[in-house]
Image (cartoon, rainbow, N blue to C red):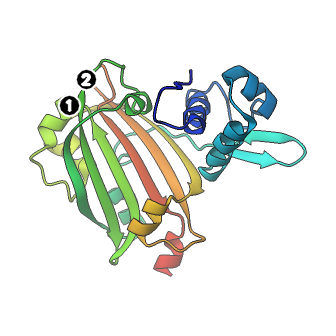
Amino acid sequence: MLDRLSSVPLYIQLKEIIKDKILKGQLKEGDKIPGELDLMQQYGVSRATVRAAIEEMIKEGLLVRKHGYGTFVRKLRPSLGFEPLISLSYALESLGIVSKNTVLERGFVIVQKELLKQAKWKSKSFSKIYHVKRLRFVDDIPIALEISYFAPDIGKLIERKNLEGSIAKILVEDLCIKVKRVEQIVFPRSASMEEKNLMHLPEDTELIEMQRWIYADGFDHVIYYLNLFMRDDLTKLRG
């Protein structure tokens, strides 16, 4: 439900509620979402709030508006797999692309309620998580922004590691963690101003956003939640 005492704008809260329904499969690709009036009545908000929430989701590539028909859930591309699926470095190298990473931020941070939900962690699992923010380059051109969140038990294992290389390799080879399941969704969306500035994106460049959840033997929770934002014009850069 919406928290009217929160500092988070109502339209953002509404957007996250609808987004959560999509990610959980309650609203499936191709489904028509409730109309503006239905959402206004269900959540007790104004038409402007509903429209702002929907516009944000269209920008993020989660919804598509079909004039005269309504607004629908856009097609997401789910995939399951293991290493080398969890290694972007491996995937790029298979295309003949060698990349390097610059670590922008790393360390333990207090976990926010919204992140707990996104990472599929229980609300009272833990109060701090290990956070790593990296910018990935190809030929000195920033191509991806990568934000990783690790459960604290994993964070303690990697906090002294060199994180400029493959995180997947550290988990699988150095720490001998046995991945048992990977959940992943990929969808296109417009870039935020921060992303445009960090990655020096042209105005007309879209992003491919990936959200990934990694489960491992011996752990009853997601060990690693990744949010990756990659520019969609890599072939042009390599041309």
Numbered badge on residue 172: none
Q: Residue at x 42, y 68 (%)?
A: 197
Q: Residue at x 43, y 28 (%)?
A: 117
Q: Is residue 154 left or right of residue 136?
A: left
From the image, tell me which residue sits under label 2.
126
Q: Amino acid at mark 1?
A: Pro
Q: Position of residue 175 (x, y in %)?
A: 15, 39
Numbered badge on residue 152: 1
- Dividing the picture into quarters, in which one does residue 113 lie? top left
Q: Earlier in the sequence, mark 1 or mark 2?
A: 2
Q: Position of residue 231 (x, y in %)?
A: 49, 64
Q: Residue at x 44, y 61 (%)?
A: 195
How many badges with numbers are in the image?
A: 2
In the displayed structure, 17 sits above or below 235; it is above
Q: Amino acid at mark 2?
A: Phe
Q: Quadrant of the N terminus?
A: top right
How packed is label 1: few (under 14 Cα within 10 Å), some, or many (20 or more)? many
Q: Is residue 56 left or right of residue 158?
A: right
Q: Is residue 96 left or right of residue 4?
A: left
Q: Position of residue 237 (x, y in %)?
A: 48, 77
Contact check, label 1 and label 2, Cβ < 8 Å = yes
**Residue farthest bottom in this picture:** 239
Residue 176 shows up from this direction: no
